[in-house]
Image: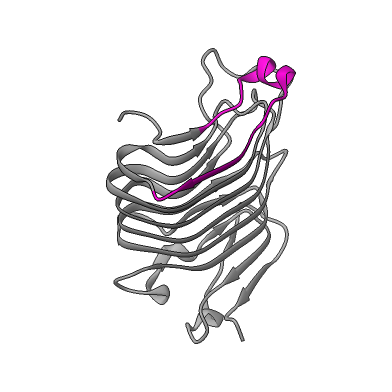
């Protein structure tokens, strides 16, 4: 299909904010996807809020753009929180395995006053894909960062670009055991970059040699990066 496979929405812009009726307490289990954009997407019409969403034990037999995608922009407002995706496998992700984006296109452009979306408590774990363009891409609002994202045990077979494509404007980010299955953690190359971090905990398996990582802070970022090899 030429759209998201499973998508959570709750109204768009002013109408959604006035109704203030969130999509919540949704469980998705044991689904098989053939083709689509996001296997699980939240937004972009999330102005009434999306929370307490859980997906597990699903499989992609064809191609999806992303396993998990949270998408919004400065016109939406609302919130996306308490979303967990785990135990997902697939053949191919044609963009990112996990993506959080806050600049989703708005027809006619985004006009002031802005309405920022609260994005927090996002968890993704035990994800496996045979092929991906990128692993993780997170781009929060500069004025209103994403908070508390925990991603672990993401394994990519063939990787076209980068394991960690972006981590911009995010607080409380944990990345643990994000790797290529063929070459392992220590051969990530440019994937060791962390862009504009705030309070990031970067973890790796015990004995991985993560303590030797040359983690680079870019874009004049403030804050600290803790490298923890599990000892």
Q: Is residue 11 magenta?
A: yes
Q: How many marks on residues?
A: 0
**Residue bounds of the magenta highlight:** 8-30
- The answer to whether 119 appears left or right of 126 in the picture is right
Percent coordinates x, y for residue 102 in the rendering: 58, 35
Q: Position of residue 137 (x, y in %)?
A: 49, 49
User: Which residue is at 61% across, 74% downward?
Assistant: 227
The quadrant the C terminus occupies is bottom right
Quarter of the rendering occupied by the N terminus: top left
Identify the residue shown where x is 33% and y is 53%: 132
Tell which of 225 and 184 is nearer to you: 184
| 194 sits to left or right of 169 | left
Give residue 226's quadrant in the image: bottom right
Could you tell me which residue is drawn at 54 percent across and 12 percent down?
Answer: 108
User: Residue 10 at x, y = what percent?
Assistant: 61, 26
> Would you place residue 69 above or below residue 127 in this image?
above
């Amino acid at each position: 299909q030429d759209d998201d496979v499973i998508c959570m929405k709750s109204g768009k812009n002013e109408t959604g904010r006035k109704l203030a009726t969130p999509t919540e307490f949704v469980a998705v289990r044991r689904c098989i996807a053939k083709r689509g954009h996001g296997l699980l997407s939240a937004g972009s019409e999330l102005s009434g809020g999306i929370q307490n969403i859980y997906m597990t034990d699903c499989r992609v037999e064809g191609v999806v753009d992303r396993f998990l995608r949270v998408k919004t922009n400065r016109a939406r407002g609302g919130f996306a929180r308490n979303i967990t995706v785990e135990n997902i496998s697939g053949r191919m992700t044609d963009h990112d395995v996990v993506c959080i984006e806050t600049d989703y296109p708005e027809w006619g452009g985004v006009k002031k006053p802005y309405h920022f979306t609260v994005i927090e408590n996002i968890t993704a774990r035990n994800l496996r894909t045979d092929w991906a363009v990128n692993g993780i891409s997170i781009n929060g609002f500069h004025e209103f960062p994403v908070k508390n994202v925990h991603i672990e045990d993401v394994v990519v077979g063939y990787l076209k670009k980068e394991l960690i494509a972006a981590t911009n404007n995010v607080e409380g980010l944990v990345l643990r055991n994000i790797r290529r299955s063929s070459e392992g953690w220590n051969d990530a190359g440019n994937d060791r970059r962390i862009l504009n971090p705030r309070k990031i905990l970067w973890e790796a398996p015990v004995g991985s040699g993560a303590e030797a990582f040359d983690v680079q802070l870019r874009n004049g970022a403030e804050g600290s990066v803790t490298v923890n090899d599990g000892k």
